[in-house]
Image (spheres, rainbow, N blue to C red):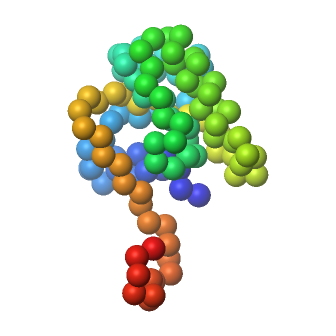
Amino acid sequence: MHTKATTRRLLAEHGVPSALSYLVEDPDQAVKIADKLGYPVVVKPRGHAGSAGVLRADSDEDVRAAVGRALTDSVLGLEGWAVPGVLVEEYIPGPKSASRPSSSTTPNTSGSPR
């Protein structure tokens, strides 16, 4: 299963620059990481695609609230596909860009984009 944590690990393994990212299981752990990284930080549900559920946190209180929401959002309506933990990442100011890696193993022979 593809998760944001997997993406960050693969980027690091292949030397692709990206934000420092830590997988955490609870709000206390998230606050420790946020204090280490320095505020603001970004809190992401581990299992959502794109920017769904991504929150900026500017304080310990914000981190606790964001982690609580991310843990809930990661499973809401997807209980059978739950992915534990959330990511706490360094905040990098500037224009944002997002891409989604393709996980298809079937060639597209239809002549139209997927």
Task: Pick the quarter of the image with the N terminus.
Answer: bottom right
Establish if 44 lies above or below 98. above
Q: Position of residue 106 (x, y in %)?
A: 50, 81
Residue at 40% across, 76% down = 113
Residue at 51% across, 18% down = 63
In the picture provided, is 101 more to the left or to the right than 85? left
Establish if 87 lies above or below 17. above
Can residue 80 be seen in the rendering of this structure?
Answer: yes
Q: On the image, which quarter does residue 101 sit in?
A: bottom left
Q: Position of residue 19 (x, y in %)?
A: 33, 36
Establish if 72 lies above or below 114. above
In the picture provided, is 30 more to the left or to the right than 18? right
Task: Pick the quarter of the image with the C terminus.
Answer: bottom left
Q: Position of residue 105 (x, y in %)?
A: 50, 77
Q: Position of residue 107 (x, y in %)?
A: 45, 83
Residue at 63% across, 24% down = 68
Residue at 55% across, 30% down = 24
Q: Can you name the residue that lies furthest to the right here? A: 80
